[in-house]
C-alpha cells in the first residue's frame, strides 16, 4: 500500500483492519500523525505493545476461539529493525508496526504487501501540517517555532500540542506565554489556563475543581506565576482604561476582546495590589526566599485574601 492510498482510506473514513507496517526513517513524526488519524477513524484507543510475542501468544491460544475479539484497541509496536519471520504476524489485525528498516531483504519481501513507506519530511509538508493544526497563531510565529525545533520533531509536536489545546481565538495571545517564554513545559497547559482564568474571574467553584487536577500533575510553578502576572497586567491595562484599544494597550484585537469578557470582580485598588503582590512573590521565588513547592497554595491564598 502507498502512503497516498492509506491517506485516501483515512479521508474516506474506512481504514483496513489488516496489519500495517509503517517504514519511517524520520523520528516517526509523520507516522505518529497517521496512527492518531487511524485510531480516530476506527474509534479505537491506541495501545502501545512492547513485543509481538504477546500478540502472537493470544492468537495461538487454544482458548482464542472462545475469546471475544478486542476491536476497541489499535495496537502499535515501534522497533528500529523489523526482524520477525513468523507468518502468523500477517494474520494479526488492528496492528501497526513502525520500523526504520528490515533486517534483510527476504523479510521485507515476505511482508511487502503490508508495508507503507513514509516519505521523508520536506519543508512544505512540515509547514502545511503545522499551519493546519494551529489556526489562530501568526505564521511568522510558527515559522520561528519550526526553526527553533529544527529536526527535533518530538519537541515540535509537544509545543504544537500545547497550542492545540486552546480555542482558535485564544491561541494567538497565549503563544508567547506557552511557547516563546517557555512558561509551560508539559501538557497540563489546559488546566493551568483554566486555573488562571478561574483566579482572575474569582470563580471559587472552578478554582476548587481545577485545583484537584493540578495536585495530580507535574505543574511548572514558574509558568503558572508567569501567566498570572501577564493576565493581571493585561486586565489592569484594559479594565482601568476608559477606552481600551489595541493602540493604547499594546494588545491585539482578539486578546483585547477576550480580556473585556472577564468579569470585573476586583476593584482597581485590588487589581494593583494583586499585581504588586505577584511581582514580590516572583522576586521571592527567584531569590530563594519562598520555596517553589508551596507556591500554588500560597498564590491562591494570597490572591483570594485581597
Image (tube, helix red, strand yellow):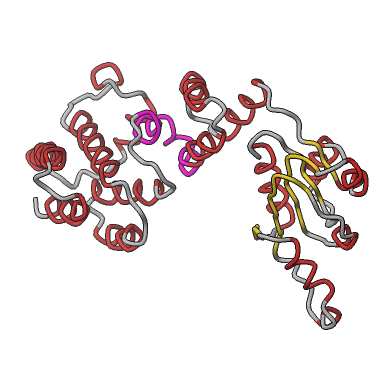
Q: Residue furthest top?
A: 247
* Residue at screen point 18% across, 55% down: 294
Q: Nearer the viewer, residue 166 or 112?
A: 112
* Residue at screen point 68% across, 50% down: 78
Q: Nearer the viewer, residue 193 or 153?
A: 153
Does 94 sit above or below residue 103? below
Q: Position of residue 191 (x, y in %)?
A: 37, 52
Taking the image as shown, residue 168 lies to the left or right of residue 125, namely left
Does the magenta portion include 214? Answer: no
Q: Nearer the viewer, residue 304 or 263?
A: 304
Quadrant (top left, top right, bottom left, bottom right) of the N terminus: top right
Q: Position of residue 120 (x, y in %)?
A: 72, 28
Number of marks drawn: 0
* Residue at screen point 77% across, 40% down: 101
Does the magenta portion include 174? Answer: yes
Q: Nearer the viewer, residue 43 or 93?
A: 93
* Residue at screen point 46% across, 22% down: 141
Residue stretch in magenta: 162-180
Does 279 sit above or below residue 150? below
Taking the image as shown, residue 244 lies to the left or right of residue 254, namely left
The main secondary structure of the magenta stretch is helix
Q: Position of residue 130 (x, y in %)?
A: 58, 30
Which image quarter: residue 54?
A: bottom right
Q: Position of residue 23 (x, y in %)?
A: 77, 40
Which image quarter: residue 245?
A: top left
Amino acid at each position: 500500500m502507498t502512503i497516498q492510498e492509506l491517506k485516501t482510506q483515512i479521508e474516506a473514513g474506512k481504514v483496513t483492519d489488516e496489519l500495517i507496517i509503517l517504514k519511517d526513517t524520520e523520528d516517526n513524526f509523520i507516522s505518529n500523525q497517521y496512527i492518531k488519524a487511524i485510531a480516530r477513524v476506527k474509534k479505537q484507543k491506541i495501545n502501545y505493545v512492547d513485543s509481538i510475542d504477546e500478540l502472537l501468544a493470544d492468537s495461538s491460544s487454544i482458548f482464542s476461539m472462545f475469546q471475544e475479539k478486542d476491536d476497541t484497541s489499535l495496537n502499535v509496536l515501534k522497533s528500529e529493525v523489523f526482524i520477525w519471520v513468523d507468518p502468523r504476524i500477517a494474520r494479526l489485525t488492528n496492528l501497526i508496526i513502525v520500523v526504520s528498516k528490515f533486517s534483510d531483504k527476504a523479510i521485507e519481501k515476505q511482508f511487502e504487501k503490508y508495508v507503507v513507506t513514509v516519505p521523508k519530511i520536506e519543508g512544505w509538508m512540515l509547514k502545511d501540517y503545522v499551519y493546519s493544526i494551529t489556526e489562530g497563531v501568526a505564521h511568522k510565529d510558527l515559522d520561528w517555532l519550526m526553526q527553533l525545533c529544527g529536526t527535533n520533531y518530538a519537541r515540535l509536536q509537544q509545543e504544537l500540542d500545547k497550542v492545540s489545546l486552546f480555542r482558535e481565538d485564544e491561541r494567538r495571545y497565549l503563544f508567547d506565554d506557552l511557547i516563546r517564554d517557555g512558561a509551560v513545559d508539559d501538557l497540563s497547559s489546559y488546566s493551568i489556563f483554566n486555573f488562571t482564568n478561574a483566579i482572575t474571574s474569582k470563580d471559587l467553584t472552578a478554582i476548587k475543581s481545577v485545583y484537584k487536577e493540578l495536585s495530580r500533575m507535574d505543574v511548572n510553578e514558574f509558568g503558572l506565576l508567569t501567566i498570572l502576572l501577564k493576565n493581571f497586567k493585561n486586565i489592569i491595562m484594559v479594565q482601568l482604561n476608559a477606552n481600551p484599544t489595541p493602540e493604547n494597550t499594546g494588545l491585539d484585537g482578539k486578546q483585547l476582546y477576550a480580556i473585556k469578557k472577564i468579569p470585573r470582580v476586583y476593584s482597581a485598588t485590588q487589581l494593583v495590589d494583586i499585581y504588586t503582590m505577584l511581582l514580590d512573590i516572583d522576586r521571592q521565588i527567584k531569590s530563594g526566599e519562598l520555596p517553589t513547592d508551596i507556591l500554588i497554595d500560597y498564590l491562591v491564598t494570597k490572591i483570594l485574601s485581597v
